[in-house]
Image: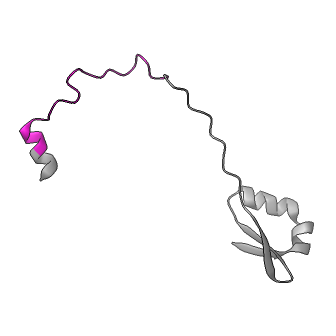
Amino acid sequence: MVTVNIHEAKTQLSRLVDEAAAGQEIIIAKAGRPMAKLIPLAQHRPRRKLGTLKGKVKVHADFDAPLPRDVLDAFEA
């Protein structure tokens, strides 16, 4: 985390915004006292569409049947 005074922030705003966009958090201080924080925005992720795997995944009828004893023993060992 970098701390800069407000005068430097005004004169170097473009550079500071680029650094923040790259992941750096920057504290802006006035007379040595922290006043604001410049942080990167969360990246926008596209919304997921429901049903995109429809017809591509098959769930067998015995999907939730109890596991064989030897498989259970392997998990519990």
Residue 12: quadrant of the picture: bottom right
Residue 64: quadrant of the picture: top left
Residue farthest toward the left in the current orientation of the protein: 69
Q: Where does the N terminus fall, quadrant-wise?
A: bottom right
Residue at 19% across, 24% down: 62
On the picture, is 32 further left or further right than 52? Answer: right
Residue 14: x and y in percent read: 86, 59
Q: Identify the magenta region.
A: 52-72
28 is higher (above) or lower (below) than 65: below
Colour scheme shown: one colour
Labels in figure, total: 0
On the picture, is 29 further left or further right than 56? Answer: right
Residue farthest toward the bottom in the current orientation of the protein: 32
Residue 8: x and y in percent read: 88, 73
Residue 36: x and y in percent read: 79, 69
The dominant secondary structure in magenta is loop
Residue at 91% across, 74% down: 7
Q: Is residue 64 magenta?
A: yes
On the picture, is 14 further left or further right than 69? Answer: right
Q: Is residue 12 magenta?
A: no
Residue at 86% across, 83% down: 31
Residue at 7% across, 39% down: 69
28 is higher (above) or lower (below) than 15: below
4 is higher (above) or lower (below) than 69: below
On the picture, is 61 further left or further right than 15? Answer: left
Which of 27/50 is in front? 50
Residue 54: x and y in percent read: 44, 19
46 is higher (above) or lower (below) than 77: above
